[in-house]
Amino acid sequence: MTVPDTHPRTHRTAGPSAPARALLSAACRTPWGGAATGLPGAAPVELPRVTGFVTSRFSPLVHSVATECLGAPGSADDLVGAAGPRTGTVLATMFGDTVTLDTATRRLTEGQVHSPLLFFQSVTTSILGRLGQSYGITGPVECLSVARDGAGEALSAADLMLEQEDIDRVLLVGVELAANERATWIHRRITGPDGPDPLPDGDCAVALLLARTDEGTGRVLLRAGAGSGSPADRAPADARHARFGWLAPLVAAAEAVRPPEGGPVPRPVRVPGRYGYVVAPAGRAAAPAAPAAPGGPA
């Protein structure tokens, strides 16, 4: 179910005085097979299985993109390591795991025995528990579903989590499944001038690892209050990103962290929303930013 953002979180001060955040790593997963050719995160349709999760691609998708972002647990590429207790997690999704919820509901209405696995994975953040166990991540967890400016709200949640003295890093995962019949009906019914954000063309996820800038220099920075956040900034600068719906600003940010081989130097990414977030290479974070992704319907 899509709900408005009514969480009474304290909004941090935007502008030149707002501390920048470092983007240490990023990953995108677009498991559309041939349909994803030329897109960020293009991958085969089949996803690696995750023990204990069945039927739905939601949790395997989160697991896949998070593992790519963080590196294999316990390996030389593991970006969490001893920082697990000081690492938080934010999961953002508009509709959540609609496949699990609809499958469980269908079984119930048909009088079938309810599957314990479906009960477990019907909790949207259950896969985060698996990731936390693998990486030793024991910091706070936040899950949000926002109809409007989802990318900006997700970045704000991660940004605010880094204000806590005992948190140095935050794993942010944005994920959406291809809209099924119910999600499509709801989305069309509430579409209007104030939202909701567009949905992606299919299953996709993006992960960003954010940190305090005093932890390291950071090649790419996130700064609040550097963009205008005006409705005119919602058109994508890169036509490819439009296919990612509300996830597009996060995908563009991931490309800024991991530019395609042989591609142009990443431009600043302006994230639509009330916070005026801009993602840019260090030294350019406060510069005027080209619009990079849609945050709502035209």
Image (spheres, grey):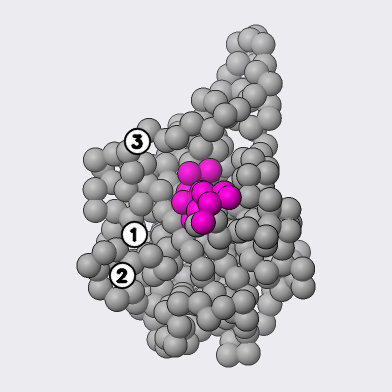
Is 35 within the magenta? no
Marks 2/1: CA–CA distance: 8 Å
Q: Is residue 185 visible?
A: no
Label 1 crowd bin: few (<14), some (14–19), many (20+), radius 10 Å:
many
Marks 3/1: CA–CA distance: 19 Å
Q: Which mark is residue 276?
A: none
Q: Is residue 185 above or below residue 55?
A: below
Q: Is residue 293 above or below residue 105?
A: below
* Residue 238, horizontal then vertical, whole percent: 29, 66
Which residue type does callout 3 highlight?
Val
Q: Is residue 15 visible?
A: yes
| 264 horizontally vs 124: left or right | left
Determine the image quadrant of residue 118.
top right
Marks 2/3: CA–CA distance: 27 Å
**Comparing labels 2 and 3, the label whose residue is closer to the camera:** 3
* Residue 173, horizontal then vertical, whole percent: 54, 54
Q: Which mark is residue 237?
A: 2
What range of the chain is rendered magenta?
63-76
Q: Is residue 53 above or below residue 285?
A: above
User: Image quadrant for the C terminus?
Assistant: bottom left
Q: Which residue is mark 3?
A: 45
Q: Which residue is mark 1?
A: 241
Q: Earlier in the sequence, mark 2 or mark 3?
A: 3
User: Image quadrant for the N terminus?
Assistant: top right
Is 65 within the magenta? yes
